[in-house]
Amino acid sequence: MKPHPIIEDMIHRMETAVNHTLHEFATVHTGKASPAMVEGVMVDAYGSPMRLKDVAAITTPDARLIVVQPWDKSLVKPIEKALQVANLGINPAVDGAVIRLPLPELSRERRQELVKVVHRLAEEGRVALRNIRRDAIDQIKKLEKNHEISEDDARRLEKEVQQHMDRFSKSLGDHAEAKEKELLSL
């Protein structure tokens, strides 16, 4: 049986919210180099802001180093400046036409700060899920009020909304817990 359109829309929106939060988790610096940590940095290139991943190749030759190689050598200085302004806690080192970003060792205090960032991001994700749930329930109540669906169908749909909410919320919590373990086990 095909789910109700309200449920379908809600599931799609919840998946999008969870994926956004997971992408945010990927940008949290765990001591392991990842292109996701810098690919969203905005660079002033050719007179307009562009994402770093659109103007350079970003590689991780080892776990403690990110290498940014601009496709146009004239962008080395603007990229270096953008990386400094982005305040990532990583000092860019220009080496000819490439920019190296050596990741420093994480101190215990910094790890605790990053765990707090992960918790904040997870809570923002949960808030987004709750807002989506509220919208879906409001739509169901509106249909019930307009006698487009029965009271029984409305209760069944609300129960289904809550089941999906629980599933997505648990998924978000599991990912946050895994990220926390990753940060603290380094």
Image (tube, rainbow, N blue to C red):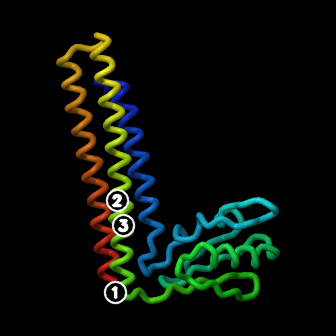
Sort mark 1 into few (<14), some (14-19) or many (20+) by Cα contacts within 10 Å: few
Q: Nearer the viewer, residue 131 or 152?
A: 131
Q: Secondary structure at mark 2?
A: helix
Sort mark 2 into few (<14), some (14-19) or many (20+) by Cα contacts within 10 Å: many
Which numbered circle lies on residue 122? 2
Which is nearer the N-term, disc 3 or disc 1?
1
- The residues tagged by marks 3 and 1 sit, at their Cα atoms, a distance apart of 15 Å
Q: Would you place residue 23 above or below residue 163 in this image? A: below
Assign the N terminus to one quadrant of the image.
Answer: top left
Q: Which residue sits at x=22%, y=39%?
A: 163
- Amino acid beneath label 2: Ala
- Residue wearing tag 3: 118
Which numbered circle lies on residue 108? 1
Left or right of 28, for residue 95: right
- The residues tagged by marks 1 and 2 sit, at their Cα atoms, a distance apart of 21 Å
- Amino acid beneath label 3: Val
Q: Which residue sits at x=48%, y=82%?
A: 63
- The residues tagged by marks 3 and 2 sit, at their Cα atoms, a distance apart of 6 Å
Determine contact: label 3, label 2, CB under 8 Å.
Answer: yes
Image spot of residue 34 (x, y percent): 50, 73
Q: Would you place residue 159 above or below residue 82 in this image? A: above
Q: Which residue sits at x=41%, y=86%?
A: 106
